[in-house]
């Protein structure tokens, strides 16, 4: 046993145990760690946006002698619009917060329309279509057919515009089968991801902190 | 005016965002670049004010009203302020120190040290807790009552077994089968759902741009 003497390892270990204490029941130690996490995460977010976004994109460029005056004015105007977020906390002029939201939201919505169609609908549809190349090997051909049938079946399950009878009935039922397998796979995958995090924490406690394992 | 001006801005920026994708002219391309790299980045950075401001406001209100567990709100506010001060004034890169010293003797309290030794353990442990809650929820909810439920259960079970050495021990082809589930039936269902999601994004975006969906405006104003 080779217990760590690094104070930061001790802090990390105590915080890890504080969070794990929730498995027994909610307690003051867990609440302390939970509130600490919220505070640190927000403090880090401020740091990140300050150093990685505002300083390089705004302060450095406005302060640089090589930046044209027109660009400086333009950047200051953008920053003033961004600063309108502060009006959210001034009831009389709180409606001004809608202006920066409108700019970000409007552009994001507009930009998402062609990109959603191009990248997520047309390209995904192209990848689903069976071509001669899909049958380069019998296995890949069979999997391509299953994917095509699965996509059609899944879409038909979400088709609520007509009553489920005729060909739509078995097709939508096949859709449920595919959806259930998909959900099961996602569930299993997520659980395994969480378990690998748990193993990571145990390795830290038993290895880095207590020195019981290497 | 309080609602009309934002709606006009949404309409104009929305049309520009959509049109810029198709128009090859350099002037439009440059404007789109500026919109993405300057306007969006800087304004989005300021939007942090809303999130952090709301959290601080919420906790100050809890302290003022002496609501349940109010003393813990001090921990959040103090941790937030100290982390922000260390991060903003102490610098984010270890190699480029800021104006605030972040080392006392051998003890470093640089923002990256705080991140690695406080935020990462807290976040990882918090998310690892979900493994227990998901497993216990699954134990209570998952019953092989019909074919659909059985398939869900089986797919999850095979995926989990396929990811650990025990799976290979049970049958050498189990990991490959788990991968096949992920690559074929899972892809088919996810792709089908994705088509619906993307059409939903398309419709919602259009409704926001055209001012049909106005939930983002919030209440109040004319």
Image (cartoon, coloured by chain):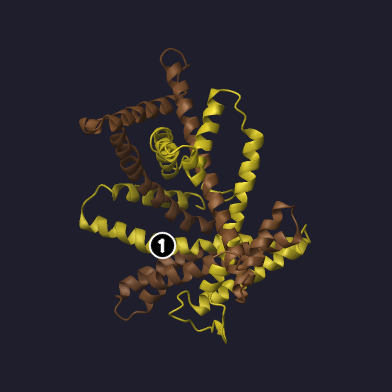
**Residue A168 image point, x, y percent:** 43, 17
**Residue B110 image point, x, y percent:** 53, 77
**Residue A143 image point, x, y percent:** 33, 31
Q: Colour of chain A?
A: brown
Which residue is identified by label 1? B41
Name the image quarter holding residue A214. bottom right
Question: Is A154 positioned to the left or the right of B129 in the image?
Answer: left
Question: Is B24 positioned to the left or the right of B200 in the image?
Answer: left
| Identity of the residue drawn at 40% across and 71% down | A58
Name the image quarter holding residue B117. bottom right
Residue lying furthest bottom: B105
Name the image quarter holding residue B135. top right
Question: Is B133 positioned to the left or the right of B184 in the image?
Answer: right
Badge 1 local density, few (<14 within 10 Å), some, or many (20+)?
many
Taking depth in this image into account, of A87 and A92 the one nearest to the observer is: A87
Residue lying furthest front: B169
| Identity of the residue drawn at 70% across and 52% down | A23
Taking depth in this image into account, of B84 and B109 the one nearest to the observer is: B109
Question: Is A179 positioned to the left or the right of A141 in the image?
Answer: right
Q: Secondary structure at mark 1?
A: helix
Task: Please say whether residue A96 is visible from this viewpoint.
Answer: yes
| Identity of the residue drawn at 39% across and 28% down | A150
User: How many numbered circles does the render carry?
Assistant: 1
Above or below — where is B149 with respect to A185? above
**Residue A120 image point, x, y percent:** 35, 41
Task: Please say whether residue A158 is visible from this viewpoint.
Answer: no
| Identity of the residue drawn at 35% across and 62% down | B37
Taking depth in this image into account, of A188 and B178 the one nearest to the observer is: B178
**Which chain letter goes with mark 1?**
B
Q: Which chain is yellow?
A: B
């Amino acid at each position: 046993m080779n217990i760590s003497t690094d104070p930061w390892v001790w802090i990390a270990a105590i915080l890890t145990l504080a969070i794990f204490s929730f498995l027994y029941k909610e307690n003051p130690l867990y609440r302390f760690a939970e509130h600490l996490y919220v505070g640190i995460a927000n403090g880090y977010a401020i740091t990140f946006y300050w150093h990685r976004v505002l300083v390089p994109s705004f302060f450095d460029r406005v302060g640089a002698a090589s930046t044209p005056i027109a660009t400086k004015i333009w950047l200051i105007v953008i920053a003033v619009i961004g600063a309108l977020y502060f009006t959210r906390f001034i009831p009389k002029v709180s409606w001004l917060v809608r202006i920066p939201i409108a700019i970000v939201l409007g552009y994001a919505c507009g930009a998402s329309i062609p990109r959603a169609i191009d990248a997520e609908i047309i390209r995904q549809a192209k990848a689903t279509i069976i071509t001669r190349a899909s049958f380069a090997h019998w296995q890949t051909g069979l999997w391509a057919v299953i994917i095509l049938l699965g996509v059609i079946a899944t879409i038909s399950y979400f088709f609520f515009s007509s009553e489920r009878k005729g060909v739509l009935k078995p097709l939508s039922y096949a859709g449920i089968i595919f959806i259930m397998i998909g959900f099961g796979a996602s569930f299993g995958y997520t659980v395994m991801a969480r378990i690998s995090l748990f193993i990571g924490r145990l390795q830290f406690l038993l290895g880095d902190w207590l020195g019981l394992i290497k | 005016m309080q609602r009309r001006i934002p709606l006009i801005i949404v309409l104009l920026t929305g049309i520009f965002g959509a049109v810029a994708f198709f128009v090859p002219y350099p002037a439009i391309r440059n404007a789109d670049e500026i919109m993405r790299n300057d306007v969006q980045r800087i304004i989005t950075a300021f939007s942090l004010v809303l999130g952090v401001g709301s959290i601080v406001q919420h906790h100050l209100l809890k302290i003022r009203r002496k609501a349940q567990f109010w003393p813990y709100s001090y921990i959040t506010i103090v941790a937030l302020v100290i982390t922000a001060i260390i991060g903003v004034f102490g610098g984010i890169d270890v190699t480029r120190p800021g104006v605030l010293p972040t080392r006392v003797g051998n003890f470093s309290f640089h923002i990256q040290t705080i991140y690695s030794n406080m935020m990462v353990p807290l976040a990882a442990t918090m998310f690892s807790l979900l493994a227990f809650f998901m497993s216990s929820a699954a134990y209570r909810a998952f019953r092989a009552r019909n074919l659909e439920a059985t398939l869900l259960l089986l797919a999850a079970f095979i995926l989990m077994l396929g990811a650990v050495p025990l799976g290979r021990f049970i049958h050498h082809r189990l990991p490959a089968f788990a991968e096949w589930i992920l690559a074929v039936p899972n892809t088919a269902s996810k792709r089908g759902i994705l088509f619906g999601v993307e059409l939903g994004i398309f419709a919602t975006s259009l409704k926001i741009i055209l001012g049909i969906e106005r939930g983002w405006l919030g209440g109040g104003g004319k």
